[in-house]
Image (cartoon, rainbow, N blue to C red):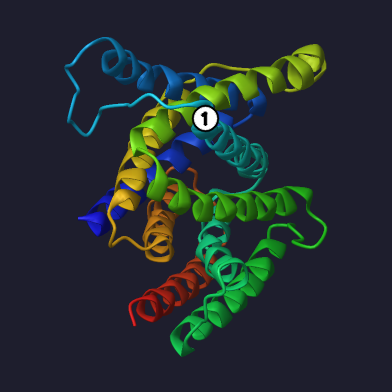
Amino acid sequence: MWVSLALFSALCLGFYDVSKKNGLKNNAVIPVLWLNTLFCSLLMLPFVLLSKHTALLDNSLLWVPSAGWDIHRMVILKAAIVLSSWICGYFGMKHLPITLVGPINATRPIIVLLGGLLVFGERLNIYQWIGVLIAILSFYLLSRSGKKEGIDFKHNKWVLLLILSTFFGAISGLYDKYLMGQYNNMFVQAWSNFYQVILMTIVLFTLWFPKRKSSTPFRWRWSILLISVFLTLADYAYFYALTESASMISIVSMIRRSSVLVSFLCGAILFREKNLRSKAFDLLLVLIGLIFLLIGSMQ
C-alpha cells in the first residue's frame, strides 16, 4: 500500500513541478510561494474545523486530532525547514530549465541515504554505494549539459540555490519519518501548512512588499492554484505512506523522485527546452542510480 501511495505522490509531484514552472515564468517568486502556502492552508482548513467541531471525520483517514504545544513546536520546525527548501527551490526553478531542475532534484535520495549514514549510523551495502557513485557521475554530466546552455554549476547562484533546496528537502525527509512515527499525518500536514503561511506572510511583507515596485511584478495565473492542489495531494499520499510501519523513508524518497519523468517530458513538450538528448542520458543515469539504491535498500 505504501509503495502505491509513494507512486501516486510522485505523479502529483511531477505535475506540481510543471505547474510551478509555469506559475513562476516571468513572475515574482515570493508572492507565488505565499499564495501556494495560503491555498494549501485553505485546502486543509475544512478538515481541521470538521474534526474539532463535529464527529463527521472521527475514525476516518481525514481526521485531524488536537495536540499540545510540544507537538506544535516540532511541526513549526518542519515548516521552517520546508520553507527554506521551497524558497531556494522556487528561485532555482524560475531561472533554470525544468529539464535540468528535475534531475538535480532527483539526487535528493542520495542525501537522505548519506544522512542516514551520518545521523543514524546506517551502513551502505554494495548496491547502495554503486547507486551513490552513479548519482555523482550523473550530477557531473548534468553540469556539462548545463554548460551547453551557459549554466556553470560552480558559479551559477540559481544552481547553488537549487542544491541548497535539495539539501533542506533531504533534511525534511529524514525529519518526516521521525514525525510520522510520533504524530498523526493529517495533523502534521495541516498544521505545517498553517505555520508555513504565517512564516511566508512575514517574508512577503519584509522582503518583497517594500521592493515590489522595483522588482519583477506579480501576475496571477491559474497554474498557481494548481501548484497547491497537486502539492496537497502529493503530501497527503506521502505522509500517509510514512505512517505504515513497514514503510522505508529511503525507498519512499526514491520513488517520489520518479516525478522527474513527468516534469522532464512536460519540459520537452510544453516548454520546448534544449539539449534534451544529453539531458535524457543524464536523467537515465540518475534513474539507474535510484534503481541500485532501491535494490540495496531492499536487501
Amino acid at dot 1? His
User: Which of the pair 27/206 is nearer the observer?
Assistant: 206
- Taking the spot 43% from the left edge, 50% from the top edge, the residue there is 263
User: Which of the pair 294/80 is nearer the observer?
Assistant: 80
Where is 138 relative to 240, above or below? below
Q: Which residue is mark 1?
A: 72
Asked which quadrant contains residue 249, the reply is: bottom left
The residue lying furthest to the bottom in this view is 126
Where is 20 relative to 287, above or below? above
- Taking the spot 31% from the left edge, 15% from the top edge, the residue there is 52
Residue 123 image offset from top left, x and y in percent: 52, 81
- Taking the spot 52% from the left edge, 30% from the top edge, the residue there is 72
- Taking the spot 34% from the left edge, 83% from the top edge, the residue there is 299
Residue 168 image offset from top left, x and y in percent: 63, 50
Mark 1 residue crowding within 10 angstroms, few (<14) / some (14–19) / many (20+): some
The reply to whether residue 222 is visible in this rendering is no
Where is 207 relative to 294, above or below? above
Secondary structure, mark 1, is helix
Residue 98 image offset from top left, x and y in percent: 54, 49
Residue 110 image offset from top left, x and y in percent: 54, 68
